[in-house]
Image (spheres, rainbow, N blue to C red):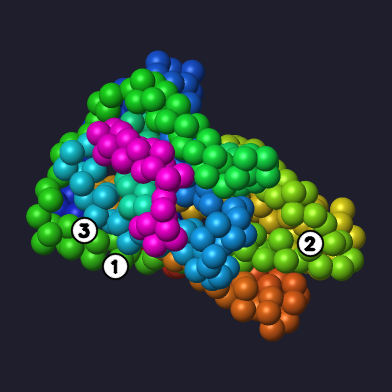
Amino acid sequence: MPSASTEASTTVGAVPSVSTAASAAVSDADSRMAPGGPGYRRMSFALFLAGVATFALLYSTQALLPLVSSDFGVSASEASWTVSAATGALALFVLPMSALSERFGRRTLMTASLVIAVTVGLLVPFAPSIGALVALRAVQGAALAGLPASATAYLAEEVRPKALITAIGLFVAGNSVGGMSGRVITGWVAQEWGWRVAVGTIGLIAVACAVAFRLLLPAPRHFTPGSLRPRVLARTVRGHLANPLLCRLYAIGALFMTVFGGVYTVIGYRLTEAPFSLPQGIIGSVFLVYLVGTVSASTAGRLVARLGRRGSLYLAGGTTTSGLLLSLADSLILVLLGLVLITAGFFAGHAVASSSVSHTAQEGRAQASALYQSAYYVGSSAGSTLGAVAFHSGGWAGTVTLGLLAVLGVVSITVFGSHAARAQSRRNPALAH
């Protein structure tokens, strides 16, 4: 899609002349990585593995909550803090971590974050109490906060613009594989050897991913260290929040995650009830649907090339809506097909929105991505909580209604963005080129 589709970008500081900026951009782009070029495959696989490790660790206890509750003699709501503490800490620390990446480098911070997270992951199986387990999970989530924003900022600096969405899509695809394995593997291992062995297994898998990541990821060539001064950071954040397009992208990410978080928080309850009455092991295997997200996220670049960013968001919203409506059926096949469409729509929309953030922010990319990640995990928390409330009050139809309202929000924001872009192009035709 032409640059006009992304509207005005966020730029801090003096603006160079058009000719100087254009020639610098061409020169810089020529030395960046591109599909088929040196280092691109290594970089893609390294960040894919980082995505796997991040989500596998982040959600490693979600499928094990009944076992954790039984082991420590606590309620389900208390056990659920082993997940909430990790995601909440990630949302809280992602912006400070992004600031550190501006000063010390993307690769350095991602490596340090993975080292701390996997080290904690190896300690989690030995937690003596629910309080200790929640504390360890909070530390783990805070450490993992260094991955998402730094990874997208790294890609925005090191990959040619035309390949950016595809590269970020592969990172998001790693997220989907990690999210799936963090639930499916732990479920089956725990069935035989208990939850402690299960989370330990995920920890070992994450260690292997972290080592491979550090060995494979090429050293950055286009990173310029920034300042750690709070005043500079605050000015950068204010600049991003003053950009209407970025704010719309943050809202879109949060709304998509509201749908996804709500659906996957309560789908287990839906499938244990009549007319399905499925056993817990089979319900855990439902998370294999995440593989659909791997495909949809990794093909987001080709989707945008055909439909443009807004067209891709409309398609993602329509796909998600179709899945929500199908899931209302009392047929297991239709419910599973609905989950496939919801998952495909969510991951495609997330990949497009997150890559658009990196494309739009010309400076302070890590902070721009961090704000997106914060909104994303706020949406996850909101979806989980509101989805459960809606299910309690209105059954699965209540959760679906919540999801439909969130998708309506995505479509409304995208339509508004289209009108805003056309209005801006009429005011300044040069922005359309």
**Horizontal and vertical percent for residue 173?**
55, 39
Height in image: 142 above or below 241?
above
**First to last magenta residue range:** 106-135
**Horizontal and vertical percent for residue 82?**
47, 59
Question: Which residue is farthest bottom?
Answer: 393
Which three-letter amino acid code belongs to the residue tagged 1?
A: Ala
Q: Residue at x 27, y 28 (%)?
A: 220
Which three-letter amino acid code belongs to the residue tagged 3?
A: Thr
Tell whether position 115 is magenta.
Answer: yes
Height in image: 394 above or below 35?
below
Front tag of 3 and 1: 3
Which three-letter amino acid code belongs to the residue tagged 2?
A: Leu
Q: How many numbered marks, from 0 up? A: 3
Tell whether position 401 is magenta.
Answer: no
Tell me if mark 1 has few (under 14), some (14-19) or many (20+) residues whose alpha carbon lies within 10 angstroms of its own.
few
| 172 and 35: which is toward the camera | 172
